Each structure stands twice: as C-alpha cells, then as structure tokens.
Amino acid sequence: MNLHFLMPLAALLQAPDDAIRDEIARLQRNFQGLIWGFVAAWVILLLYTSMIVVRERKIRREMERLKNMVEDAEKKS
Amino acid sequence: MRQKVMIGMLVLAAVILMRNLYVISVLPDEVNQGQIFRIIFFHVPAAIIAMTGSAVALIASVLFLIRKDFFYDSLAVAVTEVGLAFLAVNLVTGSIWARVIWGVWWAWDARLTSALICWVLYAGYLILRQALDEPTQRATFAAVYSIFAFVDVPIVIFSIRWWRTLHPQPVFFSKSGSFPKDWTSALVVNMLALALLYAVLTMIRLRQEQTQREIDYLRRTAHAM
C-alpha cells in the first residue's frame, strides 16, 4: 500500500513541538498583519471621506446663511 | 449630471474593489512573505496615485502662476489634500508590512524617509494655506510652495534605484520583476478602482473649494452693505 501522501504529516508529527508552535505563531502574525493593513487602509479613506462630508454640510449651511443675509440687505436698501 | 457621473464612478470603484478583494484572497501565498504580501495591492496603488496627484498639483500650480486663474489653485489644493490621504494609506500599510517582515514598524532608509518627508511637505502646504487670509497672496504662496515640494517626489520614486535601501526593489512593471501576470493584473485593477475613488474625492473637493470662494465673495459683499 502506497502511503507516500502521509509523509508530510509524518514529518510534522516528528517535528519538535516548539518548531510547530513557532510556525503557527508566525502564520498567525502574518495573517493578523494583513488584516490590520487592510483595515488601516479603509479606516484612513473612510475617515477622510467623512471629513469631506462634514465640510460639505458646513459649506452648504454657510452658503445658505450668506445668501439670505445678502437678500435681506438688498431688500432693506 | 456631474453628480450622477460621480455616483456612477463611486459604485464602479466599489464593485471593482469588492470583486478584487476576492481575487486577491484566492491568490497563492508568496513563498518568502506568506499572506502579508497581499498588502502590496493597496500599498503600491496608493503610492502611485498620490505621486500622480503631486504631479497634477505641480502642473496646476505652474498654470496658476502663469494665468492667475483661481480654478488651478482650487485644483492644486484638491489633488494635494486627497493625495495626502492616499500617501497616509501608503505609509501606514507599509509600516504594518515592515512590522511583520522586518520586525520593526519603521526604518530610516531612503525610500521610507523621503516618503515621510513628502507627506510632511504636503501637509505643510495645507497648513500654509490656512495661515494666509488674502486669496491672491494665499494662492501665489501656495503655488510656489507646491512647486518646491514636488522636488521630493522624484527622490521618493528613484530612491530605491539611487541608493541601497531596505525597501524592496520594484516587482511590478520592471525588468527584474518576479511577479506573475495574474498578480500584476490584480494590482492594475485595484489601482483603477482606487484611481476612480481618488477622482471622485478630488471632484468633490474641487467643487467645495469653488463654493468656498463664492462664500468668501458673498461674505465680502455682505460686509460692504
């Protein structure tokens, strides 16, 4: 019976526990780093977009206020 | 009409990014780096887009000084501000990658340092604009500053060729590149989506700058009455 396909598993079982733990920790750090990288990229872009939205609202309010002010002043004069 | 175009571009960018997130996730891991290499699909496009924005800011600043048309001043500030956000994405994602691969968050090598200086210079551009009240003086000073700030951009781009750096050499669009074709196409598609997002944000900022100019005019009119 050909059991060649079990060789990597056998090698893993024979490896010292520390080496396996280190490798698992390395893979975990690697994956966490990737997730943090993606999250950071999107958080920065979303924060900036929300800053733009807030500014847009402020500008519109200010524009409205000034237009009314100028119109009122024109009516009075 | 303009609003519809912007919404269309935004939706297209979102669809491409969603699809590409899947494409990137099913790519095989890089032999030496493992999964973390996927950060490159955001890190590199963010840098390329930010540097392109700097070039547009340079052209707009020169055109403002020649023609004295405030549209170019608005364009320069819009592309610079959005570019600064993208450069921040580039710096932060690079730092996270460095922590995993190099074991440190930051190294003072030529590429990283020049990119940080670039960010600080363009942040200075925005601070300078806040400090000046008179519109023509503000636009003129800012245009001259932007032209000088651009000097750092070629240093950022070519630093990895000019000096020996810790930062990896280019792996896309280069003769010594080792990335397979499907990885390059994933990068190009991601760059297209992020460029669409950049364009939409720039258009909104440009409109805001122009409205702000109108507000300044109305304020002066109101005070004169």
Image: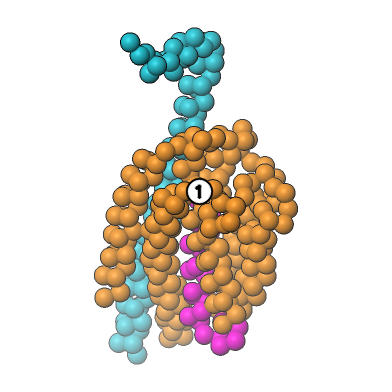
Chain colours: A cyan, B orange
- Residue B160 point in image, percent of width and height: 67, 53
- Residue at point 26%, 75% (across, down): B1
| Residue B84 is covered by the magenta coloring | yes
Residue A55 visible in rendering: no
- Residue B104 point in image, percent of width and height: 63, 35
Quarter placement of the C terminus of chain B: bottom left
Q: Mark 1 lies on which chain?
A: B
Residue at the far front: name it. A1
Kind of element beneath mark 1: loop
| Residue B9 is covered by the magenta coloring | no
Q: Which secondary structure class fits the magenta region best? A: helix
Q: What stretch is highlighted in magenta?
A: B64-90
- Pick whichever, B206 or A72, lies toward us: B206
- Pick whichever, B99 or A6, lies toward us: A6
Instruction: Classify A20 as above or below B152.
Output: above
- Residue at point 56%, 77% (across, down): B59
